[in-house]
Image (cartoon, rainbow, N blue to C red):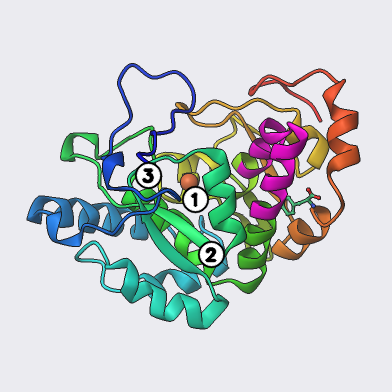
Amino acid sequence: MAVQPAVYGASERPPRGDYTRAADDYTCAQNWAAYTEEDHDTYHRLYLRQCEQLPGLASEAFVAALPQLGAKERIPRFDDINERLYRATRWQLVAVPGLIPELAFFSLLAARKFPVTDWIRRPEEFEYIVEPDVFHDLFGHVPLLFNPMLADYMQRYGEGGLKAARLGACEMLARLYWYTIEFGLIREAAGLRAYGAGILSSHGELPYSVQSPAPQRLPLSLERTMRTRYKIDSYQQTYFVIDGFEQLFQLTAQDFEPLYARLRGLPEFAADERGA
Ligand code: PHE
Ligand code: FE
């Protein structure tokens, strides 16, 4: 059966990526041989530029795990990373042609499989791309999969997603993902740092999220997060800060079913709405 591409939010053009390559679970082989020298060069330049600004801005655990991605000069083979990743936290990377539907995504995470888009942005998209590409997925997400606490959080998120789907609460749960895994900040001994993949893979948003006086930074609250809309094509105006991965893990251990029921009746917050 041919799978259909997933589209989130409004878009002018069809999603990129060849979904005819994908199996029923949306995974495909990483088409490593298809990368051109230009693709590898784009990856290398993105990697170098982002590395330069990690000190003082990226979370300690992220910086410590980054070398696990291997040589920065070429787009890695996912299977090479998998040898180290499976040993560290029993996670595996699987290639996908692009964004995949929620249920397929949750099912993979619940099985400790992280979907990584295999294509890379074009050189003219060097500064910014809305969709996740291999640089965002690898550089942004994979280092923290080597962290045992975050690795377990991601699996539980996947299981929680399957449950949220049954309860019609995917939107609320997706906001939690957005404001933690994608755009989360963490208070460390040395100061405020980023651990969210959307920030860590963005040249502009990394310094902005940690240092700019413009956005508001609230302590993570499940309720506030799940009620807050988000924008996928601009820097965030609201960030949520955790005190440690332990706190994130504890806070999300409770059964979300009563929480979803309670929040359903409450008004939403706009992405840039001020106040807790
Ligand atoms: N505790 C959540 C539930 O009962 C599942 C979950 C765990 C969600 C961790 C996100 C992160 O639905
Ligand atoms: Fe992401």
Point out the image quarter for the N terminus: top left
Mark 2 near mark 3, Cβ–Cβ under 8 Å? no
x and y percentages locating residue 57 in the rendered image = 51, 55
The residue pinned by badge 2 equals 144
Give the residue displayed 33% in from the left and 34% down from the top: 129
Mark 2 near mark 1, Cβ–Cβ under 8 Å? yes
Label 3 CB-ligand 2 distance < 8 A: no
Give the residue displayed 45% in from the left and 41% down from the top: 100
Quarter of image, res 84: bottom left
Give how far apart the Cα atoms at labels 2 and 3 are.
19 Å
The first of marks 2 and 1 along the sequence is: 2
The residue pinned by badge 1 equals 197
The residue pinned by badge 3 equals 203
Amino acid under disc 1 = Ala
Give how far apart the Cα atoms at labels 1 and 3 are.
12 Å
Label 1 CB-ligand 2 distance < 8 A: yes
Foreground: 167 or 194?
Answer: 167
x and y percentages locating residue 7 in the rendered image = 44, 28
